[in-house]
Amino acid sequence: MDAKPQQNPEPPYSPLPPQGATSVPPPPAPMRTTLRRAAFGAVAGAVLVAGAVIAVPDDDMAVPPAPGPVARAEAAAAAGSPASLSDLTALIGDRQKWVETHPADAPSWAVLGSAYVEWGRRSSDAAYYSRAEQALQRSLAAQPGERGNTEAWVGLGALANARNDFLAAKKWGETVRSRQPKGWTAYPVLIDAYNGLGDYAAAAKATEKYGTLRKGVPALARTSEMYRNQGWREDALATAREAADHAGTAAEKAVALHRLGELAAERGEPAEALAEYDAALRTDRSHLVSLAGRARALAALGRTDEALADYRTVTTKLPRPEYVLELGELFESLDLDGDARTQYTRLRGLLSQARTAGVDESLTEARLEADHGDPEAAVELMRTAWEAQRRSSAVADTLAWSLHRAGRSEEAMQYADQAVGTGVRNASYAYHLGVIESSLGQDGPARGHLEEALRTNPDFSPLAAPLAREALDELGDPAEGGPAQMQPPAPEPSAEPEPSQEPSPEPSPESGAGASPEASEKPSPDGGKGSPEPSASVSPSPRTRDGATAAP
């Protein structure tokens, strides 16, 4: 479907000037006193309840009609679940019409603003973020957040996350949480903000709290994401599967199936990922992020013609910068350099539009510059992000790779180590670290990380995966017996005479009565006495959630 609401997205009021997600709204303009929609709903609800009490049961009574698209969208929002695009369109149109005649209805303005945020995020149309901000400011002008309008604050937090302004999102989320400690609505905002800032410990705590306050499929999805960020693949998979099994709507089911596809792709199982993406698209044809995942899986399977067709479709209907970059790199891997340059030029235009709309796409821009443009510009972009406390594994990895591409591999090492050390099992992170180590002459660690990248996902990138294999081939096999510095020193010639072949005397009293030969000290390689041999009984090594032996 066309990713645009059918109704006119511009409400018929004089828009307030955009001032950023953290701005303080201007004082409210004088408005005609009207009956609020919330009060009307309460009266209508009371009438319906009274009617239900006095109604006489009738076996022939018609079944109540199914909820309409607006009601479905409202129910999804109340549960913290995604709504279908068609239902979201209907909700936007409904609230636009309502606030035309009820401009003082703060809750409706908050709902409209939050719906604009969701539409902008799912259509990749940043123009909706400005409309969302105007609607949320209008809501706060009618009823300030300090007087209970926390829904507008939550909307501003979601807007800040959509713009990748994670510090502002954290501020709004923590403000709502401090005022409503038993409410759940702030936690999705906080989880996204903490993850964007790289504070995975805080994100995990927020996820656990969210799960206790709001059980259900949304909480399972967040928990699966938490496990994935910690490197607990089996737990992430099991929880994502549980979310898919319990999904109650097509939109919710598609999101859960998409998550399963992403986990399969990260494990290096493109055929399984493709099956999950196809299932998501059968469930919800408008779930375009699954079409992008499908294109990625097809490329990994070598079905490049189909992958190109899917990429062309998704970058037309959902032109997210990262998808355009992926398409350009797929063209480049096929030696279609002209088509690749066309996509990179198009990507620069999208990045410029994002900056104008107040959206921070510096991560994708740095990846473009590092590999296909100016690495020094990529370094500056990621330095700015790092200084702004955006310290996620993705930012650490991109900063490291940008520094390496700019010829500063020694400086890059600390960031590459940090990206790999966060726990996320990402083949690209391991590949980048391996290449950086190789450039510094650290062949052993480089070989290990390149092997890890290809073992994690052999086809993690149409451009980088072949380069990882080439780098590994150039390193060759490790030296026989391991590195020279790890070989045991040759024993020094012993100055003591050769021991006689006569039977050993009985143990003396000094050696301990009844002591067994195994417990006595044995001669060390240089002829002296060493320490007693360790007992064969040792404690088992601790294990990770996946069953692998943890490092000591």
Image (tube, helix red, strand yellow):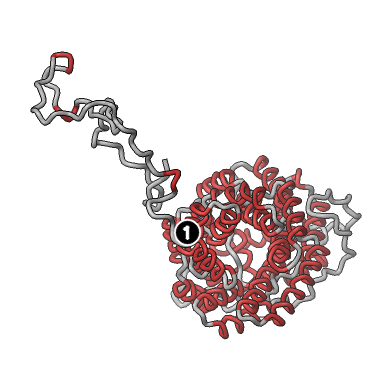
Q: Amino acid at mark 1?
A: Glu
The answer to whether residue 383 is left or right of residue 422 is: right
Q: In this view of the protein, which residue sits in the foreground, 180 or 225?
A: 225
Query: Whole-percent x and y of residue 264?
Result: 47, 67
Task: Give the crowd class for mark 1: few <14, some 14-19, many >=20 residues within 10 Å.
Answer: many
Q: In this view of the protein, which residue sits in the foreground, 298 or 551?
A: 551
Query: Whole-percent x and y of residue 131?
Result: 80, 64
Q: Is residue 135 above or below residue 386?
A: below
Q: Residue at x 25, y 31 (%)?
A: 533
Q: Secondary structure at mark 1?
A: helix
Q: Residue at x 48, y 68 (%)?
A: 458
* Quadrant location, the C terminus: top left
Q: Residue at x 67, y 41 (%)?
A: 179
Q: In this view of the protein, which residue sits in the foreground, 533 or 132?
A: 533
Query: Whole-percent x and y of residue 47?
Result: 63, 62
Q: How many marks?
A: 1
Residue at the disc numbered 1: 452
* Quadrant location, the N terminus: bottom right
Q: Is residue 125 above or below residue 26?
A: below
Determine which quarter of the picture holds residue 320.
bottom right
Tell me if I can see residue 15 in this picture: yes
Q: In this view of the protein, which residue sits in the foreground, 217 or 501?
A: 501
Q: Residue at x 82, y 68 (%)?
A: 11
Query: Whole-percent x and y of residue 404?
Result: 66, 56
Tell me if I can see residue 35 in this picture: no
Determine which quarter of the picture holds residue 32.
bottom right
The answer to whether residue 97 is left or right of residue 272 is: right
Determine which quarter of the picture holds residue 288.
bottom right
